[in-house]
Amino acid sequence: MTNPVHHERQGRRFRLPAWTLKRGLEVLFLLGLAPVVALTGLVLAGVDNRAVDLLAQFVAPALSATVLLTAGLALLRMRAAAGLAGFAGLLLVLAVWPQWFPGGPAGEPDAPVVRLYSANLFYLNNDTARIRQSIEAADADIVVLIELASDPALKIDELLAGYPHRAASMRLDQTRGPSRSVIASRWPLTPRADPPDGLHSVAATVRTPLGPVNVVGVHLTRPWPFQHSWGQISQTMALDTVIEGLDGPVVAAGDFNSVSSARIGKQVRRDLGLHPAPGFPGTWPGDLPAVLGITIDQVYASPDLAFVSRRLGGSTGSDHRPVVTGITRAAR
């Protein structure tokens, strides 16, 4: 006789309600966003701290990420988290505004415009043809090159064809290869004295249609924690010494390793009396879309000069994007 088959009774599975999982995720987002709000508040308050200064460099990409996060949270109907993300985004807008829209004097109507091209070429970048293509496309009057590597330096006449007037810095020996900085111009120029020890720069007075303009190519060290925080500050003080020795309008361009609204940018504006070109879109790192980058490649000018345009140049093969600015006489 066949024994009857009895179905095995299975225990009931425990499942969290969907609303509980959603609520848990929202709490995690709230906990993650709270430090962003707090740190952005410290940046806005201008707290003079090296860690806060490092965070101030990244407010632009943080804003892009926060806008996307806010939209995603809103679609998921996580109202509390979306609200906090929106508030964080608002604080980030306030933090990034001074570098994207720094103000500055208006240009004098009908005054000549001088176009300046400045680029950190990266000292391991030997793509002379690509660098030349970028310079040609910019059609600038003055060219400032930072970290010019050995091979392009050997082909300088090919690289800077059309810019016969040049000034170069002393060679800077890096860990993996030497480099130097160069100012080249379509118009005659006069090289200036070598910079103080500890500052890598090159300076020249260019005879432009605006009159003599002092051009300084600058490369500051990296910020903390890559280098000690005093390094950038002391180099900016040395740059102040260079500019104090110049008569007439000044343009300082190059890799400042700092956005204009962070500590070094504020020091340049306060102590050197220079104002920055707008800082959007970003210049570094070059592999990311420019809207996600940060603008550490700056162009500053004295109050008697005004910026009328600012855009990014074509790729040079470097991890930095070039900057092309239009500069004219400031309206009186």
Image (cartoon, rainbow, N blue to C red):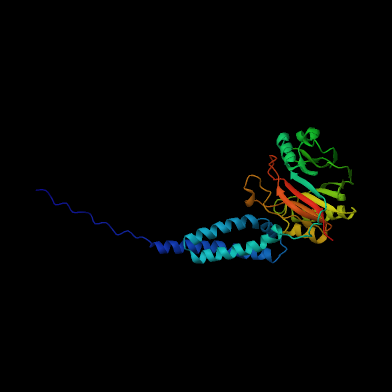
The residue depicted at 26 percent of the width and 56 percent of the height is 10
In the shown orientation, is residue 42 left or right of residue 195?
Answer: left
In this view of the protein, can residue 196 be seen by the observer? Answer: no
**Residue 17: image x %, image y %?**
38, 63
Above or below, 96 against 131 in this view is below
In the shown orientation, is residue 47 left or right of residue 161?
Answer: left
**Residue 215: image x %, image y %?**
84, 48
Residue at far left of view = 1
In the shown orientation, is residue 96 left or right of residue 68?
Answer: right
In this view of the protein, can residue 149 be seen by the observer? Answer: yes
**Residue 211: image x %, image y %?**
88, 50
The residue depicted at 72 percent of the width and 38 percent of the height is 131
The residue lying toward the viewer, choosing from 295 and 223, is 295
Above or below, 207 against 234 in this view is above
**Residue 217: image x %, image y %?**
81, 47
The residue depicted at 77 percent of the width and 60 percent of the height is 104
* Quadrant holding the C terminus: bottom right
> Tag count in the figure?
0
The residue lying toward the viewer, choosing from 259 and 107, is 107
The residue lying toward the viewer, choosing from 206 and 273, is 206
